[in-house]
Image (cartoon, helix red, strand yellow):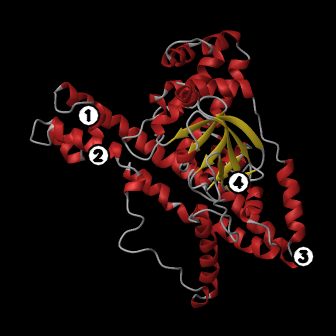
């Protein structure tokens, strides 16, 4: 797991520097926003459309051609039994089902061994398969992107257009690494580590040394060995306290910084030319990725009300649907087809639920955030940097997401809230 996470971060600058270099030059040459410039990267990050999207679409294609397969998929009851039945089917459906599930089953949908793997959420996987069969989105049309490219390129000074082509080509080439380094590295490393930790927990729970197998995630490796070998270690009660602490602490409990606030980046003129170019590229990236809320070069629009939240639009379009507030990967199981995902921020691990989503809204993020990449790749409305969407929008409420204005409007309260008011 540690080696896989190291591999992920080995590619940080490879996946980011060319994008920042492209943005720094193009925005300076043309005056376009980072959002406009980044729209030209659409279609270059296949995994942003979903974990194992090719395998999922292959399964959907096989199911569309199989009446028996669709009947199995439509069964009600325990979702795991549906998955087991699909895997056991003869022919293309069984082959495709095994191909898809083998890729996602042990992949983590979070950042740590305490987070579940996709295979532990069979309901979510069945809903994702059903949604993909019904939608048949196919390959996203890139005509609008190409037209936008011609428009921006025409604004580039004639003597810089060859360099524009080179910068855009390199940014497109490495854009896929933004998601791939997580999906192919720590997502699998963490998921496989969790499989081992849960087996430790099962054995310790059978011996009465932990209250629940999940509590093994709060042991150190040395403590796991000690308890498995019958040596002294923390009591079940102490381990339970650790689990409770981890489960109840949130990002809001962490200090905003360690020791002191970070300082401003050094002035560019202190660097030699080559380093100055690299620093300018990274400053461009960091200004957008860490901005509290706003596109680069624009003041934040923070005005919100009890029924409306404003943020930064990352993809155009208007969508109405049910808001699903997700604060933890364990909440993925509640997401239904067509829901509007409302969360603090997204990561590559959210890709497994993408086939279900109608729109994305986040508290944090900018044009370079994962949510922005996902919205552009999947062609769904997205709004980031609202600051308060997860605390303002009730779970289950019907909302309108307007990708043109950057507004999320609550149209109707959640059913449970309406019933409570009626009582």
Task: Residue at 49% x, 33% y: name it.
Answer: 118
Estimate the spatial distance between the alpha carbons at disc 4 and disc 2, rounded to whole Å.
Answer: 36 Å
Residue under pointer 2:
245
Q: Quadrant of residue 178?
A: bottom right
Q: Is residue 121 left or right of residue 41?
A: left
Whether the residues at callouts 2 and 3 have beta carbons within 8 Å, the answer is no
Query: Residue 20 in the image: x percent, y percent?
Result: 65, 68
Whether the residues at callouts 4 and 2 have beta carbons within 8 Å, the answer is no
Estimate the spatial distance between the alpha carbons at disc 1 and disc 4, rounded to whole Å.
Answer: 43 Å
Residue under pointer 1:
200
Q: Earlier in the sequence, mark 4 or mark 2?
A: 2
In the displayed structure, 126 sits above or below 294; it is above
Residue under pointer 4:
314
Query: Residue 353 in the image: x percent, y percent?
Result: 59, 36
Q: Is residue 297 left or right of residue 3?
A: right
Query: Residue 182 in the image: x percent, y percent?
Result: 52, 50
Estimate the spatial distance between the alpha carbons at disc 2 and disc 3, rounded to whole Å.
Answer: 60 Å
Identify the element where label 4 is drawn: strand
């Amino acid at each position: 797991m540690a080696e896989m996470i190291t591999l992920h971060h080995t590619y940080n600058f490879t996946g980011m520097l060319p994008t920042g270099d492209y943005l720094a030059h193009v925005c300076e040459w043309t005056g376009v926003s980072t959002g406009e410039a980044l729209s030209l990267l659409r279609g270059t990050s296949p995994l942003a459309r979903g974990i194992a999207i090719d395998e999922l679409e292959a399964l959907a294609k096989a199911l569309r051609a199989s009446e028996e397969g669709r009947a199995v998929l439509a069964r009600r009851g325990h979702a795991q039994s549906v998955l087991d039945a699909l895997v056991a089917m003869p022919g293309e459906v069984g082959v495709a089902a095994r191909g898809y599930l083998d890729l996602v089953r042990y992949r983590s949908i979070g950042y740590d061994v305490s987070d579940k793997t996709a295979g532990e959420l069979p309901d979510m996987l069945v809903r994702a398969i059903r949604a993909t069969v019904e939608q048949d989105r196919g390959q996203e049309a890139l005509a609008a992107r190409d037209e936008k490219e011609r428009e921006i390129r025409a604004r580039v000074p004639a003597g810089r257009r060859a360099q524009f082509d080179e910068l855009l080509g390199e940014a497109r080439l490495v854009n896929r690494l933004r998601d791939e380094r997580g999906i192919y590295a720590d997502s699998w490393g963490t998921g496989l580590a969790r499989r081992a930790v849960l087996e430790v927990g099962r054995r310790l729970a059978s011996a009465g040394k932990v209250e629940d197998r999940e509590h093994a995630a709060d042991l150190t490796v040395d403590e796991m060995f000690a308890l498995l070998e019958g040596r002294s270690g923390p009591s079940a009660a102490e381990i339970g306290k650790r689990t409770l602490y981890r489960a109840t602490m949130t990002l809001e409990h962490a200090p905003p910084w360690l020791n002191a606030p970070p300082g401003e980046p050094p002035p560019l003129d202190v660097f030699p030319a080559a380093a100055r170019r690299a620093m300018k590229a990274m400053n461009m990236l960091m200004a957008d990725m860490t901005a509290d809320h706003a596109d680069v070069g624009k003041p934040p629009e923070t005005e919100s009300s009890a029924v409306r939240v404003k943020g930064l639009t990352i993809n155009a379009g208007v969508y109405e649907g049910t808001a699903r507030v997700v604060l933890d990967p364990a909440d993925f199981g509640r997401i239904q087809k067509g829901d509007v995902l409302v969360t603090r921020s997204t990561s590559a691990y959210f890709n497994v639920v993408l086939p279900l989503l109608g729109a994305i809204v986040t508290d944090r993020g900018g044009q370079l955030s994962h949510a922005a990449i996902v919205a552009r790749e999947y062609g769904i409305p997205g709004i980031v940097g609202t600051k308060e969407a997860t605390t303002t929008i009730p779970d289950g409420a019907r909302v309108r997401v307007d990708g043109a204005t950057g507004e999320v409007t609550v149209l109707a309260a959640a059913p449970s809230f309406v019933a409570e008011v009626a009582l």
